[in-house]
Image (cartoon, grey):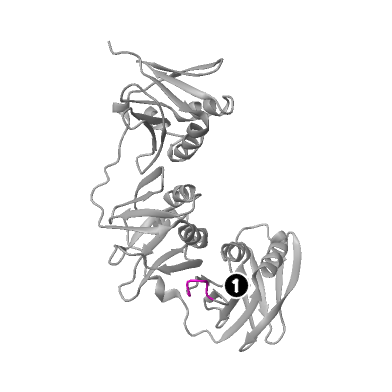
Amino acid sequence: MSKPNTIIVAREALLPALGLVNKAVERRTTIPVLANVLLAIDAKAGTLTITGSDMDCELRASLACQAGKDESFTLPASILHDAVRKMPEGAEIALLAEKDFATLTAGRSRFKIQVLPSTDFPTMSEGTFSHSFELDAGLFERMLDTVSFAISSEETRYYLNGIYWHAPEEGSTLNAVATDGHRLAKFVAPLPQGAAGMPGIIIPRRTVGLIRQLLGDKGAVKVSLSDTKIRVETGKAALLSKLIDGSFPDYVRVIPTGNQNHFTVERETLAGAVDRVTTVSIERGSAVKFAFEAGGNLVLTTNNPDAGSANDEVTIEHGEGSSVEIGFNGRYCLDLLNASESKRLVFSLGDPGSPTLIQPETADETGLKPLFVLMPMRV
């Protein structure tokens, strides 16, 4: 019989690692080991690697530890996290895994937690990545935050359930696009070295959320991808995920190019007005009438026969073209306004039945700017 292997790890390092990895763990699963995290000790390197998986995404975090030998086993993700969280701050935790149970000790606190063997834990095959490049974490975060609100939740059009990431052949940009058929968001960034010729991929909504969890630190993030998987690595954590197997539609066709009526408004002021008038919109799909007055104000109106009506006004800071009255889904418009970082937005409109193009008044420090498309509603 081999000697017991006590693992020593700092609570302040273990707790955030568990908090991160647990986000990849499937809470409701019929496979017991998927409710666990895999703990793998490399005694020579002095590291403990924790892995959580739902068989579509795999999230790993590494931290320093002391151990006498290499070992791996799995423990229930939720119970382990709660046990560590409730231990005293600054504590050193001793973890001893035996055949059926692991003992977790810190000071006078002691937990005995059921073990499942590491051989039962599924691991994802990475395959071969065709492209690898580095991306600034802050830029990556902005890209995801700007477009993710437009990801579709409609299961029948599964290919819209993520962000389409691609590098157009004719340009030198990395584009992120999401649409649910009612609104579209596009963020354009300079093409990183190593990304040229990358396949167009669709990153699932769940993966987008997990990537966001990795981007708290500043600095560079390493991205590796193929046409079936993506891996995102930071200093001490890595995410491996499958991609959506489908073809994203030709979104360029729905971006209007000939709208002749342009109105500039202050974003936060408009967001506040839209939020107020949608108070009486009980249903998510209730329309708000936007009356853009050339040389005047933008008047917002809602009318709900069962709840009442509301109206508000916003100053149009600059206008070109003719007055336009158009209906938008108020909630969709508010999502768009909250996702944009610009101080002022330009609404470019055609007739009341045509899509509206919405862009920041000025480009950001890179010289590029995102764009949004909002489909009209009948009012």
The N terminus: image quadrant: top left
Q: Nearer the viewer, residue 316 or 224?
A: 224
Q: How many marks?
A: 1
Which span is picked out in magenta? 363-367
Can residue 31 be seen?
A: no
Element marked by disc 1 = loop
Can residue 180 be seen?
A: yes
Which residue is the site of mark 1? 378
Look at 41% across and 48% down and name the residue there. Answer: 234
Look at 68% across and 66% down and name the residue there. Answer: 274
Q: Nearer the viewer, residue 9 or 368?
A: 9
**Is most of the magenta stretch helix, strand or loop?**
loop
Residue 95 x/y as whole percent: 43, 21
Q: Nearer the viewer, residue 63 or 159?
A: 63
Tell me if residue 217 is in the magenta stretch.
Answer: no
Q: Amino acid at mark 1?
A: Arg
Residue 340 x/y as whole percent: 57, 66
Look at 63% across and 71% down and name the residue there. Answer: 343
